[in-house]
Amino acid sequence: MQELKERIERHINQLSEFTATPENGTTRLTYSVEDLQARNYIKDTMKEYGLQVREDGYGNIFGKLDGTLINAPSVIIGSHFDSVPNGGAYDGPAGVIAGLEVAGLFVKNNVAPRYPLEVVALVEEEGSRFGGGLMGSRGMMGLLSDEGFRSLRDRDGISTEEAMVKIGLDPSLPRRRDPKTMKAFLELHIEQGPILEEKNIPIGVVEAIVGLTQLEITIQGQAGHAGTTPMDRRADALVAAATIITQLPAFAVEEGQGTVITTGRLNVFPNGANVIPNKVVFTVDIRSGKEQNVLNVIEKTKALIHSVCNDNIQTSVDQLLYIQPKQFNERITSLLKKQSEELNIQYCSINSGAGHDAMVFSDYTDVGMLFIPSRDGLSHCPEEWSDSVHLENAIHILFEAAKRLTESEG
């Protein structure tokens, strides 16, 4: 088992080197140079483990171990490999590594599956470059149109297809995946919260994921000189945005039941020290375990945004992402619990407050998900860390579950 632990740590350490911010966390944006470096490492490892490697028109990476059944649907294991700016080394890559090592155990133990096993490394789950998030999984399942994909731009105005071509990817490759080719999807992820560590429990079997939406708000005002424009003549977009942003937290508090709201990105134009801002673009992230809570806060947020409009201030709201709360497949969840028990690994049931690719796939195939503890509950920061022993435990559980799923008819 020491060999597996060492491989896990080697993978984590190697992938963490592919960052645009050395010594300050992992910054690996989709279709960046760092993406290409990580991509090549993942593909090389897939080939080393005897998998057939391909990419789709989004740049998602697949490594396949054929089954004995012809044209049978695959059991898929994986996660994403992009990051937030200055994030950690485990959010996403831990799940990709788990998929790689499960496939490695199949090969090492001469397990010949009846149904194919596939490892997947997905792009743009975080939405850090092109917004919205879950792009790789949403695109695969047809929730993102070709036109919508092509129209996406990063902060520098670079399109998705331009960015793909720049690192040698082919956007003309097939993008969508027929759900009939997916027998099940399994994902491992770090918890990104404190519950498992506080309970001293090494495995969380995820029962459900909260619903979430992401809004992009644009406030349009009028630029002017900071010294010569009287206060009563100003159309300050930043003041209008601040009026909105400071009132948003109260909506979540009023809604209760674990509802949360976050303003995560704020861009001010023209961003000069002596210029009245003429435009502000910011995001609002709303999450709750109950869909009605999300809908209520969306309605209140839109009403608030509309209230700041006048002859000089104009506003618009774009909904970048909307996903309902997801309950995971009971059969897969029970299987993961059973394998934990048989391996004598303590677990507890847990819900996820973060969105994951698994929630997209859950509408199209049977899905199961495991969490491992995050030290101090920290994530999306350089201090993010999870114990390789916990990751090893999860890999063994997923290996046993994948063996049964690739063997059984159900």
Image (cartoon, grey):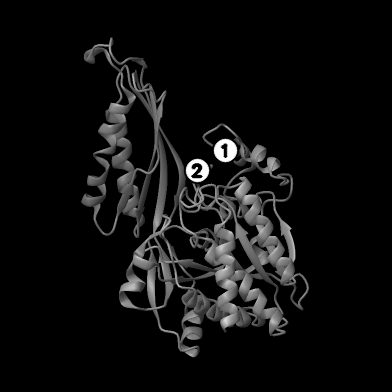
What secondary structure is marked by label 2?
loop
Q: Quadrant of residue 62?
A: bottom right
Q: Which mark is residue 152?
A: 1
Q: Position of residue 55 (x, y in %)?
A: 71, 55
Q: Determine whether, in the image, residue 184 is placed left or right of residue 274.
A: right
Q: Determine whether, in the image, residue 285 is placed left or right of residue 406.
A: left
| Three-letter residue code for mark 2 | Gly
* CA neighbours of label 1 inside 10 A, class few (<14), some (14 to 19), many (20+): some
Q: Using the numbered discs, state the Cα–Cα distance from disc 1 to disc 2 in whole angstroms.
A: 8 Å
What residue sits 63% from the left and 56% below the top? 38
Q: Label 2 near label 1: C-beta < 8 Å?
A: yes
Q: Which mark is residue 131?
A: 2
| Three-letter residue code for mark 1 | Leu
What secondary structure is marked by label 1?
loop
* Residue occupying the far top of the picture: 228
Q: Position of residue 241 (x, y in %)?
A: 31, 31
Q: Position of residue 286 (x, y in %)?
A: 36, 49
Q: Is residue 11 visible?
A: yes
Q: Quadrant of the N terminus?
A: bottom right
Taking depth in this image into account, of 322 and 106 the one nearest to the observer is 106
Q: Quadrant of the C terminus?
A: bottom right
